[in-house]
Image (cartoon, rainbow, N blue to C red):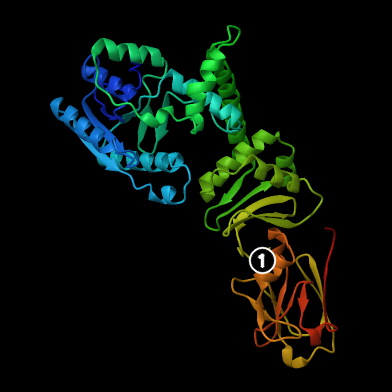
Amino acid sequence: MQLNSSGWHRDDHLVVAVSTGIDSMCLLYQLLNEYKGSYRRLTCLHVNHGVRLASEEEGQFLTAYCKRHHIDLHIKKLDLSHSLDRNISIQNEARIKRYQWFDEMMVALEADVLLTAHHLDDQLETIMYRVFSGKSTRNRLGIDELSKREGYYIYRPLLTVSKNEIQQFQVENEIPYYEDASNQDNKYVRNDIRNRIIPAIDENEQLKVSHLLKLKHWHDEQYDILQRKATQFITEFVKFDEQLMKLEMPRQVFNDLPEHLKMVIFDRVLSKHFKLFNISDRTYDDWFQQFKSKKAQFSINLTEKWIIQIAYGKLIIMAKNNGDTYFRVQIIDKPGNYIFDKYLLEIHSNLPKSLFPLTVRTRKSGDTFKLNGRDGYKKVNRLFIDQKVPQWFRDQMPVILDKQQRIIAVGDLYQQQQLKQWIIISKNGDE
């Protein structure tokens, strides 16, 4: 069983992730034998997920194995109680925590390359999973042989080696390993692909799972082209103000791009500048349809902190209440007609002078107003929910306060009963 050793150099400190399964134990065996002179130093990392009875035994086995071969070993026990208590899949949380620990250890060890035992069958399984789960459009289709992390590389030297080759190598060399019984449980999607779907395809002489590799190569070429086009667009059209944390791009130029290129661009700018990840295709489709609407100005909530503001032919990603241009406080000290974003405010001359000056602003957390005709107060946010006001509209709607900073009107949804005839609020412009 040959490893592809092109991913590291003789003077590298290698770290190998070992689960005690057949794949990682065969990889470790080869690093200790045929490839012993190909690196400067070797360290093992092992994660105890704490969900199987055999986990402690596996850790003890690996400790003895590494001691016998004079290899440094570090073991991490994960706390996955959060997922277990909520009765949800632990696989995603385990992977995130596992790689967080790998990141920490690679820095602490001042290591160069982390090796994992992903093999050819894992590659085919991943391709099939991403295709049929709808996760192929904005990612590479399979597993990369080499990937860069913060301060180090991950390399997969078995990625062209089949599971059968690994099993044969294990038998020939009598390599000890532990079998994870959960790998046979088809309630996990990847296990079902591995144990049931791929063997069923292989039984058909006219079908070959290996053709998925051709699909991966084609897909990844298109992915790279999209990435280059995204880089070109970002360089030419995207402006980011780091001080204001505000990003702008031309609305029409963006709207004219192919849909998948738009997704790649947004993936790049949202992750880099705003630390927003994993936006769904459906969410992007909804946003892009709104971008194409005839509305001149509106906003879309991204999170509690960030919004997309559509204004003056621009797409602007910014913090809520960032700047006077789009979210402002307006002081009204006399009757008259006023424009506040998309609303017309008619303040009649009969409005009691004791209420002036009026403050007009957008909502704030904790805003409440007095109920008409009965005692008590209601939260402005609850009013929006009850009236099914879209998120992006809530941040445009004017909230009017009197001299004492009491809310007397909320858009066209609420006015104090005794003031209705003197404060008239209506939407201004097209909707």
Helix, strand, or loop for circle 1? loop
Inspect the image, locate mark 1, and give the three-letter code of the amino acid beneath it.
Phe
Residue, far top: 205
Quadrant of the image containing the C terminus:
bottom right
Displayed quadrant of residue 405: bottom right
- Label 1 CA crowd tier, 10 Å (few <14, some 14–19, many 20+): some
Q: How many dots with numbers?
A: 1
Can you see residue 1?
no
Displayed quadrant of residue 296: bottom right
Identify the residue at image location x=83%, y=65%: 428
* Residue 368, horizontal then vertical, whole percent: 64, 78
In the image shown, does 74 or 38 lie closer to the viewer? 74
* Residue 416, horizontal then vertical, whole percent: 76, 83
* Residue 64, horizontal then vertical, whole percent: 16, 30
Displayed quadrant of residue 222: top right
Identify the residue at image location x=46%, y=51%: 86
* Residue 324, horizontal then vertical, whole percent: 65, 67
Figure check: 245 above or below 197: below
Identify the residue at image location x=23%, y=31%: 43
Identify the residue at image location x=33%, y=38%: 52
In the image shown, does 56 or 251 lie closer to the viewer? 56
Q: Which residue is mark 1?
A: 327
Figure check: 234 above or below 303: above
Quadrant of the image containing the N terminus:
top left
Can you see residue 356?
yes
Q: Is residue 240 left or right of residue 389?
A: left
